[in-house]
Amino acid sequence: MSPSPHFTRNHTRTAAWLASLAACIFTAALPATANAQVTKIQSSPNALILEAADVKAGTDMIFLSGQLAAPLDPAKPGSTIADYGDTKTQTISVLNKIKTILEARGYTMADVIKLTLFVAADPKLGKMDFAGANEGFKLFFKTPENPGTVARSTFQVAALAAPQFLIEIEAIAAKKK
């Protein structure tokens, strides 16, 4: 038994409508991918950090969980601040970890658009060592290897995951596909 002409006409219209819809969706998606870009916004070239980063649709992005410093001696599990170093040393360790994670996924530190720093007080100073965090930061951003910088927020926290940690850093990176 063959389908009725009414069914065939409706089926053909539905198929044509779906094909048209798919073409529109596919066409609409193309410009976003083709124009995918990251614009870093910095009004003062002397500023240490960006004011913002504008990430367009179709851009590859990676969100890193908060990272903590590695012990100064990898063969020895650390349990004290001395095992991990001061805020500057820990910042360098964390940013090196972030760099390694990013490179394993095809990103570079130049692709980082946003960092969030959580800084605990250094018992030796009785306060957070913001200057130490900035000293470590400056070894990775606004350098000959990576002349760019990032949008950044810094929060003083009462404590981190364990008392030996002075800084934890989250990162977001974005790049053109």
Image (cartoon, grey):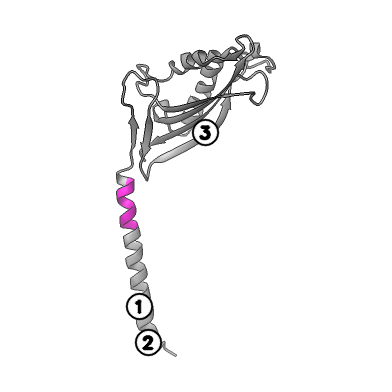
| N-term-proximal mark, 2 vs 1 | 2
| N-term-proximal mark, 1 vs 3 | 1
Q: Which residues are magenta?
A: 26-33
In this rendering, the label closer to the viewer, 3 or 2: 3
Quarter occupied by the N terminus: bottom left
In the picture, the disc for residue 6 is 2
In percent of width and height, residue 104 lies at 48, 31
Dominant secondary-structure state across the stretch colored magenta: helix
Q: Amino acid at mark 1?
A: Thr
The stretch drawn in magenta includes residue 32: yes
Q: Amino acid at mark 3?
A: Leu
Q: Amino acid at mark 2?
A: His
In percent of width and height, residue 78 lies at 67, 17
Quadrant of res 38 = top left
Name the residue tied to disc 1: 12
Q: Is residue 53 left or right of residue 170?
A: left
Name the residue tied to disc 3: 64
